[in-house]
Image: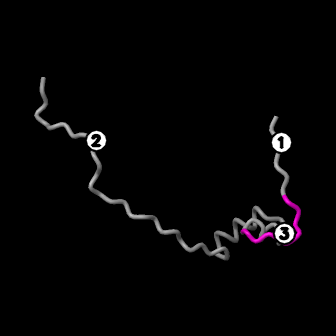
Amino acid sequence: VKSSKPKRGKGKSSKKKGKKMAKEVDILSPAAMLNAYYICHNAPACLAFRGFPWPGSPKKKGKKGK
């Protein structure tokens, strides 16, 4: 019971995948502002979430695992 179609091996594909370019993110876009509105309670929290922590701000303490 031989099939007439040739078997194809798992070889490398000839298509090349291009590298994904990182998009320039606008932190003042409407979507980003709406997100910040819901997750931040004040200006220092908003800046800390965006990667600009205030100097002298208290560090977050991690939860202890048992």
Judging by the rendered image, the residue that carries numbered circle 2 is 10
Between 14 and 35, the residue placed more toward the observer is 14
- Residue, x 85% and y 52% (percent of image)? 61
Q: x%, y% of residue 39? A: 76, 61
| Amino acid beneath label 3 | Asn
Pick whichever of labels 3 and 1 is earlier in the sequence: 3
- The residue wearing badge 1 is 64
Magenta residue check for 56: yes
- Residue labelled with disc 3: 42
Give, as a single range, the part of the protein colored magenta: 51-59
Q: Position of residue 31 (x, y in %)?
A: 64, 69
Report if residue 35 lies within the magenta region: no
Left/right of residue 1 with respect to residue 65 in the rendered view:
left
Query: 29 or 48: nearer the eye?
Result: 48
Q: CA distance from mark 2 to mark 1?
A: 47 Å
Quarter of the rendering containing residue 15: bottom left
How was the colour assigned to the protein in this rendering? Answer: one colour
